[in-house]
Image: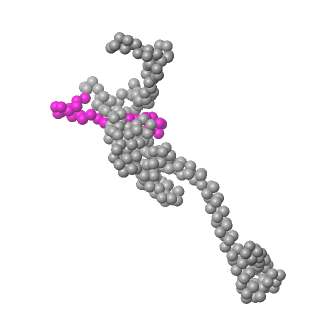
Amino acid sequence: MKKLYKLKEWYSLEDAAKRLTLTLNEEITVKDILQLFIEGHLELSWYMRNIHAQKVAPYTKILNWDKKFGTLFSVMHDEENQNYVKYDRSKVTHAVSTYEDNSGIVSLNGIFNLDLEESSSTKDWILSIITNTINYSCPLDGFFVRDDKDNLWRIMERHNFNPFEEGEYKKDDNKPIMHRDNFFPSAELPSIEDIGVCKTVIESLEKHLCAEEPVNDNMQNINNESQTQRKLNNVLKLLFYISEDKFNHSHGKEKETANKLETFSPVGKQSIKSWLVEGYELVKKDNFSN
């Protein structure tokens, strides 16, 4: 791995793909990174710079709920038609709510994780990049990010505000300019160049994938050992055939032949003798198989 990659705490999508290509020893593309995000294998983050946002919290609301008795309404009075309507099932909605004690808008700076749970628009946007199509839906309810404490933030956009021109939005004099009433959920998605992956996320993915490799590594080691042994066997057989042809060697004459070969080799005659015996056994095995 390049030394520079070890120093970085945040990677652009291109750099993340290059690092994983090196560490996993296979080609990884930016689209692969995006797909891993969609499938839940890693988190993407947005390097934010002065982006307006509002802290929110997800909640699930059960409609037709009787707070007094803690049960679902079985019937509800229809004021318009003056009759009672029976409910066969409850209605459940999922949404986000602002904090009552936090009505202001803040500017976010730094690294925040993209959130897929609260808005499908983020997923649609990423899929449109992967498939090279522009068919993602506009996030009417905004889209969301999470900070390092898992707090949820909705990206906001300021109403067109110019207090000096007629027809332009004017803020309420009783509310500060950064009040949430002066903003609305943003439909503008971030630039793909501002999206990347944190170092810790990449390291976690590498650790997870490398943990699955020992079996393959063991198989590779076995294959390497098998190839090495095969080459060694061929050399031993070659030694036997050369000795047989040049020195009239035959099984039982290993000591005599080893004395002759010792003058041509830096190894001792005992080693040569054992090699000749092994070579003979291999040759005999081949002849027997044939």
* Residue most extreme to the front: 290
Q: Residue at the location (31% across, 33% down)?
A: 184
Q: Nearer the viewer, residue 163 or 72?
A: 72
Q: Is residue 69 above or below residue 265?
A: above
Is 222 positioned to the left or the right of 189 in the image? right
Q: How far from the left and from the top, in percent, is residue 213?
A: 60, 55
Q: Quadrant of the C terminus?
A: bottom right
Snapshot quadrant of residue 147: top left
Is 240 positioned to the left or the right of 62 in the image? right
Q: Is residue 193 visible?
A: no
Q: Is residue 174 above or below residue 278?
A: above
* Residue most extreme to the right: 252
Q: Nearer the viewer, residue 112 or 134?
A: 134
Q: How far from the left and from the top, in percent, is residue 6?
A: 50, 55
Q: Residue at the location (62% across, 55% down)?
A: 214
**Segment tinted magenta in the rendering:** 146-171
Q: Is residue 152 above or below residue 71?
A: below
Snapshot quadrant of residue 217: bottom right
Q: Is residue 170 above or below residue 263?
A: above
Magenta includes 147? Answer: yes
Q: How far from the left and from the top, in percent, is residue 44?
A: 44, 45
Q: Is residue 70 visible?
A: yes
Q: Residue at the location (64% across, 60% down)?
A: 219
Q: Main secondary structure of the magenta part?
A: loop
Magenta includes 100? Answer: no
